Amino acid sequence: MSLVEHAQNADTAFEHIPIIDLKDISSSDPASRKALADAVRDACINVGFLYVKNHGIPDTVINDALSASKRLFSLSEAQKLEIDIRKSVNYKGYTPLLSSNNDPENAGDMHEGFEFGWEEMQAKAFDEKRANDGAMAGANIWPNDLPGFREEVLTYYHAAVELGKKLFPLFALALNLPEDFFSDKTKNSAAIMRVLHYPPQTGPVDDRVIGIGAHTDFECFTILWQEPEIQALQVLNTQKQWIDAPPIPGTLVVNLGDQFARWTNDVFKSTVHRAINRTGVRRYSIPLFFGTDYDVKLEPISSCISPEHPAKYEVVTAGDYVQQRLKATYGH
Ligand SMILES: O=C(O)CCC(=O)C(=O)O
Ligand SMILES: [Fe+2]
């Protein structure tokens, strides 16, 4: 069956999000990699969300990033506003509560966050991996007086980038492409990381103000760590039902975004999701958004086009696309 036919027969009324074991992701046996890619293809076409286990990011790296982000969010408002994202030309820095709005029908997202992109652990004056960032060019902004923060969150970033570099070949295989299809399109790690803090919402709640309003992500895929034991994330199926995506110990969530929808002419689904924290306790999460390099054009893959399924999207560079979406989310 062609990819287009597979997508036309998709079962998108899912009630569960599949869990996929990545133990064979670097297997020397092509048949094992192919079996893994088959499972990934089904998840990408039917659901657009999956959990991955055996992802390779050590617990210590996760725990250090979590503790760093807790320290950041417990700084005073004045300290946090020193690194306000509105002072940055390229959407790096601190986003206060209610300053972003992911769902245009809503009145603001009930979370605060901090956002940064690629940087070598030992910062370089000229970082060749950022040389072609186009619309997204510009350095990260780091908090003052927060020892260890940069190292701890960057360590997580680099570990997740290693995982992301293994996932691109797997997605390529799932699209019946050579495994290195994305290699020359992902040389520069155009990955954006956020650390997020959702205060608990108790008492009467305005449905137009939730943790993060209904949205799709705008890169190729997102790797999301969520705080254990706190249910907040929900995923929308085509029956318009919100399906819970609780944290599952030992896993990360991987979901597809709109860049992959463009690369695949909607064969891979970029699925709407939201988060609502009504648990009575604070919640932290860490998404990392992976795109193709900012200077690469988002051109549909030929096997995802047919006479009955013609190309749907205008071709733009990844950088222009991401910048335009960030502008809509942050309103500046
Ligand atoms: O915090 C979460 O669980 C979801 C975050 C999210 O969807 C996003 O940042 O795009
Ligand atoms: Fe999202």
Image (spheres, grey):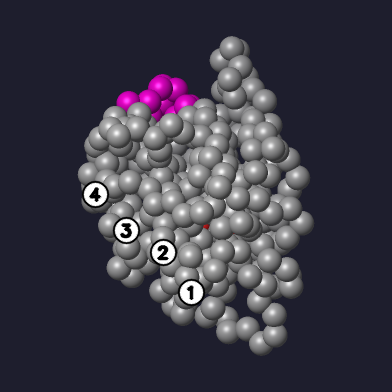
The residue positioned 58% from the left and 20% from the top of the image is 26
Q: Residues within 10 Å of mark 2 (few under 14, many from 20)?
A: some
Q: Please state the extent of the stretch shown in magenta in the rendering.
A: 169-184
Q: Which residue is mark 4?
A: 135
Quick one: label 3 or label 1, which is nearer the N terminus?
A: 3
> Disc 2 marks which amino acid?
Glu
| Residue at disc 1, secondary structure | loop
**Residue at 64% across, 50% down:** 66
Mark 3–mark 1 distance (CA, rounded to whole Å): 18 Å
Say what amino acid the circle numbered 1 marks: Leu
**10 Å neighbourhood of mark 1: few (<14), some, or many (≥20)?**
some
Residue at numbered disc 3: 88
Residue 82: which numbered mark, if any?
A: 2
Dot 4 surroundings within 10 Å: few (below 14), some, or many (20 or more)?
some
Give the percent coordinates (x, y) of residue 126.
28, 32
Q: How many marks?
A: 4
Mark 3 and mark 2: span between their CA atoms? 11 Å
Judging from the image, what secondary structure is the residue with disc 4 in?
helix
Q: Does the magenta segment cover residue 283?
A: no
Residue that label 1 marks: 98
Q: Nearer the viewer, mark 4 or mark 2?
A: 2
Q: CA distance from mark 4 to mark 2?
A: 24 Å
* SS under mark 2: loop
Tag 3 secondary structure: loop
Q: CA distance from mark 1 to mark 2?
A: 17 Å
